[in-house]
Image (cartoon, rainbow, N blue to C red):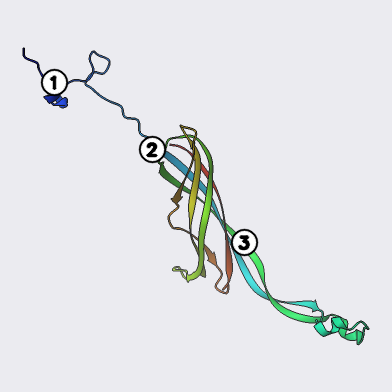
Amino acid sequence: MVQSDKRNISLKYVPFTKGTANKGNVIRVLSREALICLTIQECIVFSILEHVCAIVPAWPFDPAAMLITKQQNIPDRWPRPEMLIVKKVVCTIPKKDKNRLKVILQESPKRILCCKIKNLTLTKKIVPNPSGAGNLALATYEYEIKIRYQDLKGQLKQEYFNSSIRCQQAVLEPQIKDFSVEFSGLCTAHEC
C-alpha cells in the first residue's frame, strides 16, 4: 500500500481554491492602516507696535503710612503724574494659509472624533527686504496635530503628526522695529 504525502508538495504550485470564484488565486488583503487627509486653516496676525509715552496718575505707596491711623500730610496722598513707555498697536496684518497633509493612521477609523493643534512653536524676526522697500517681518512656526478617533472595534485611539516648518511674512515700513505675532488654526480630517 502506497500513500502519497501531500505535505511535501510546494504550495506555490497547488491551487488553494477550486472553481471560478477566485480565478488566478488573487487574494485581497485588507490593510489595518488608513490614509487620512488633514486640512489646517492657518491665520497669522502681525501686529505692528509703536513705543509711546503715557502719563498715568500714580499714588505714592508707603507701607508705614498704613500703620498710622491718623491721616497726615493729605496733599501727599493726591495722585502724581507718572510717565510710562508702553507699546501701542498701530495696525494689524492678517495672513491666511492652508496646510494640507496626508497621514497614515495605524488603525482604520470608524469615526474621527477630533483634530486639534498642539505644541505650537512660534518665532519672529525682522530681515531686510531684498527689493529694498522696507523690511520683512517673518513668522516661523511648527505645531503638532492630534487626531483622536474610534477604530472598527470601538476602541478610542489617538495619534500625533508634525506639521513641518511653516513660514509667513509681511512687509514693514523702514522705521518699524517691533511687532508681535499671533497664530490661530482650525483642523479638519477626513478619509482621502
What is the three-letter code of the residue carrying label 2? Glu
Placement of 64 over or under 140, stated as above or below: below
Farthest residue, direction bottom: 73
Q: Nearer the viewer, mark 2 or mark 1?
A: 1
Residue 147, position as x, y percentages in the image: 49, 44
Q: Nearer the viewer, mark 1 or mark 3?
A: 1
Image quadrant holding the C terminus, namely top left
Return the mark for residue 92: 3
Placement of 10 over or under 51, stated as above or below: above
- Please state if 98 lies on the left or on the right of 57 as rendered: left
Residue 149 seen from this side: yes
Image quadrant holding the N terminus, namely top left
Q: Residue at x 89, y 84 (%)?
A: 68
Category of crowding for the residue at label 2, using alpha-carbon neighbours closer than 10 angstroms: few (below 14), some (14–19), many (at least 20): few
Residue 141, position as x, y percentages in the image: 49, 59
Q: CA distance from mark 2 to mark 1?
A: 37 Å
What is the three-letter code of the residue carrying label 3? Thr
Given residues 111 and 17, the one toward you in this image is: 17
What is the three-letter code of the residue carrying label 1? Lys
